[in-house]
Amino acid sequence: MPSDKPLYSVSSSFAVCRDGEPVPESLKGAVAAIGNFDGVHRGHRHLIDMAIKSGKPAAVLTFEPHPRSFFQADKPLFRITPEPVKLEIFARLGLAGVFVRRFDQSLASCDAEAFVRLLAHELELSGVVIGHDFHFGRGREGNPERMRELCDRFGLECLIAPAIVEGSQPVSSSAIRAALEAGDIATANKLLGYRWFVRADVRHGDKRGRELGYPTANMRLPDDCRLRHGIYAVRASVDGKPVDGVASFGRRPTFDNGAPLLETHLFDFKGDLYGKVLDVEFIGWIRGEERFDGIGALIAQMDRDSEEAKRMLKADRTPSMIG
């Protein structure tokens, strides 16, 4: 049977420290893994595991907005895990907490030495964990060797993590984005180490799915979401309980060809979801979005899609982050 249990449980003592806030007692002297952590994928979690194994309070230092959004504001970035989702995942990983620093002109112009001074004095860290290709400071002047040198000067421990590879390629956020854009859920989930999921509120739609015998929970995903339009096997968390389903993400070419929506039909579910915030995780790609000539043909295909989704759900063994 597929795993219905969450990969990790949420820590009740998890702390979030933002700009201008005092460092909580639970985070003083922490060892922090540093990065953007979009996706919190297997490579990211290796850094986090190294921080946890340090024997000191373990934390993450991450940045919002994503630095790429700051430097290339005219090019929307497909966020694998928007900030609320990213923080939720951090809270499940056994960390004491997270430092969230605003990435603005002030931080972008900070040189390498000033950045490490911030780590030691403002964040009161005792050590850091960085990736093998980590760059920091104005113009990306700092590299892992420079970080180690500066940490020695400021009395910080510096741990450098090796690359985590899948096949011959490093696990990366870019590779995961590319897989999701191609509808390749299997590859995306393998690189993440868990089922990719989205979070949004359920809104009223045109009730067309109910008329077709397939009522759906309709969710508007972020405008930067570039998930391939199509039909997917999914599982949702409804009031903490997993419910299998099949979902369409796209513009509904048979009807209105409108704005992209995620429309999720939950098997054997009866209840009111309107206004609720729903987590929906993706298990597998079924087919691309199509336009049908008639309602009968559409319903027959939806029946086949549902059976394929059930087959995928039964066979899947990928861990879940949502329960």
Image: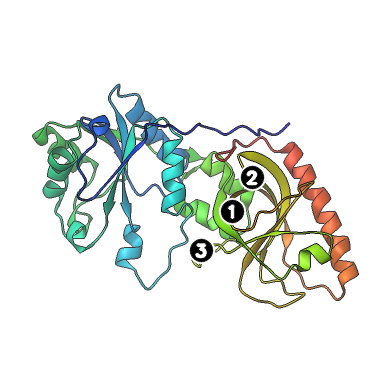
Horizontal placement of 188 versus 122: left or right?
A: right
Q: Earlier in the sequence, mark 3 or mark 2?
A: 3
Question: Which label sits on residue 238?
Answer: 2
Which residue lies most toward the top here? 55
Residue at the location (58% across, 64% down)?
Answer: 220
> Where, by quadrant of the figure, is residue 258 drawn?
bottom right
Q: Secondary structure at mark 2?
A: strand
Q: Secondary structure at mark 3?
A: loop
Q: Amino acid at mark 3?
A: Pro
- Report if the CB atoms under discs 1 and 2 are less than 8 Å apart: yes
Q: Badge 1: few (under 14), some or many (20 or more) residues near its Cα, within 10 Å?
A: some
Which residue is farthest left? Answer: 153
Cα separation, mark 3 vs mark 2, equals: 21 Å
Residue nearer the viewer, 210 or 155: 210
**Image quadrant in which the N terminus is located:** top right
Mark 1 or mark 3, which is nearer the start of the sequence? Answer: 3
Cα distance in 3D space between marks 1 and 2: 9 Å
Q: Residue beneath label 3, please?
A: 222
Would residue 130 be seen by someone viewing this image from the given angle?
Answer: no
Residue 105 rendering spot, x and y as whole percentages: 20, 63
The structure residue drawn at horizontal position 83% and vertical position 49%, both measured from the top left corner, is 307
Q: Circle 1 is placed at which residue position?
A: 276
Q: Does residue 39 show up?
A: yes
